[in-house]
Image: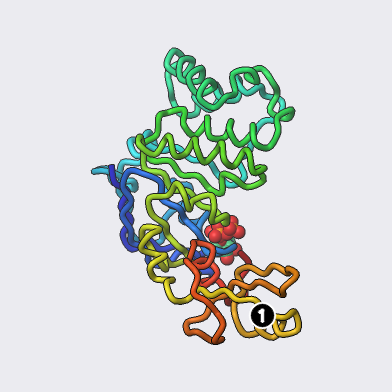
């Protein structure tokens, strides 16, 4: 069960949105991190076949997505960043409608919808109109439609956007439970969404995959670059002009700072154990929005 992209490239007029991306993703959860405009959604839409590649190839298992799209699509589930829905449809009617679009038989889709309503804790809401649902429930309906055809390749574009912390945890657990069944590519701005559940992380910047490795390996790279120290408030301001500050907390004894520096810039700075937030800021400290 492997997704393979080779030299995938896409431009929109003068914007080079995806640059020569080559990667292989197997079963499990793959976190796709990147700042706004780094190309995550475009990459997902290319993988889904919603927009054509300018160059490159795309295979899932032995299927050539460009030549055997119908077979490829039968393995695919996709939750877009902004999933359009029909506010007057009930949860059940919406899922039935989506199963027709996915060419599923009536009998199979009825069974499958019941299973998913149960699994996603939506059973008691099945006759509610979509417009009556909270953001979290709507996101769960979005996931349910993506899972209707029991996909082997699941693409989730910022699935936790707009969810409260509790819903985010429920969602994370759900994704983790699906990871044994399929290859999941999950894009997000929120590092904590993928830190604990992703088997590996892809960091995308300006259309290219800058890093692709396990969390443990990526953090090894940050060792020796993350520092902590306490400074009087007046000195802390000067430091924030020079270094990338990851955390800052004012307490009675001064300002507690966590910052990134390739070398020990202050004698009283102590090395800290790096986390993914540090790594993310290290690569996006040049002013891009996170
Ligand atoms: N249909 C399009 N037409 C023109 N430019 C586009 C189109 N889709 C994306 N772009 C541009 O391609 C670049 C990558 O956009 P994309 O939406 O893929 O990034 P992203 O990483 O998903 O960003 P975000 O996190 O904000 O959703 C951006 O400069 C964007 O403006």
Residue 103, percent across and down? 44, 25
Give the residue furthest to the top.
107
Few, some or many C-alpha atoms within 10 Å of disc 1 (few <14, some 14-19, many ≥20)?
some
Residue 99, percent across and down? 49, 25
Q: Is residue 2 visible?
A: yes
- How is colour applied across the structure in the image? rainbow
Residue 174, percent across and down? 49, 35
Which residue is label 1 attached to? Answer: 240
Quadrant including the C terminus: bottom right
Residue 244, percent across and down? 59, 76
Give the residue furthest to the left.
62
Q: Nearer the viewer, residue 163 or 102?
A: 163
- Where disc 1 sits, the SS reads helix
Q: Confirm or reject: label 1 Cβ below 8 Å from ligand 1.
A: no
Residue drawn at x 49%, y 51% is: 194
Q: Tell me where residue 151 sits by quadrant.
A: top left
- Ligand 1 shown in quarter: bottom right
Quadrant including the N terminus: top left
Give the residue furthest to the front.
253
Q: Nearer the viewer, residue 204 or 249?
A: 249
Would residue 178 be found to the left or right of residue 270 on screen?
left
Q: Nearer the viewer, residue 197 or 71?
A: 197
Residue drawn at x 55%, y 69% is: 281
Residue drawn at x 57%, y 57% is: 189
Residue drawn at x 33%, y 58% is: 23
Q: Nearer the viewer, residue 190 or 289?
A: 190
Q: How many marks?
A: 1
Q: Is residue 55 visible?
A: no
């Amino acid at each position: 069960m492997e997704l393979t992209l080779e030299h995938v490239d896409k431009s929109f007029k003068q914007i080079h949105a995806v640059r020569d991306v080559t990667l292989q993703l197997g079963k499990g959860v793959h976190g796709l991190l990147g700042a706004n405009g780094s190309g995550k959604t475009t990459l997902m839409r290319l993988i889904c076949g919603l927009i054509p590649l300018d160059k490159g190839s795309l295979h899932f298992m032995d299927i050539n997505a460009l030549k055997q799209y119908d077979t490829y699509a039968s393995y695919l589930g996709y939750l877009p960043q902004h999933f359009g829905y029909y506010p007057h449809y009930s949860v059940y009617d919406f899922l039935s409608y989506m199963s027709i679009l996915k060419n599923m038989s009536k009998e199979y889709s009825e069974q499958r919808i019941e299973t998913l309503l149960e699994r996603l804790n939506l059973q008691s809401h099945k006759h509610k109109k979509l417009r009556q649902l909270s953001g979290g429930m709507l996101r769960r309906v979005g996931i349910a439609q993506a899972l209707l055809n029991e996909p082997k390749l699941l693409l989730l574009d910022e699935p936790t956007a707009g969810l409260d912390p509790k819903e985010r945890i429920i969602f994370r657990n759900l994704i983790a439970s699906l990871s044994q069944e399929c290859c999941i590519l999950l894009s997000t701005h929120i590092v904590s969404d993928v830190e604990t559940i992703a088997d590996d992380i892809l960091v995308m910047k300006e259309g290219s995959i800058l890093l692709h490795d396990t969390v443990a390996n990526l953090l090894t790279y940050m060792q020796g670059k993350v520092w902590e120290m306490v400074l009087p408030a007046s000195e802390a301001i000067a430091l924030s002009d020079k270094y990338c500050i990851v955390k800052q907390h004012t307490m009675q004894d001064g300002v507690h700072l966590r910052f990134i520096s390739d070398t020990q810039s202050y004698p009283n700075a102590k090395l800290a154990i790096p986390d993914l937030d540090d790594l993310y800021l290290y690569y996006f400290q040049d002013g891009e929005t996170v």
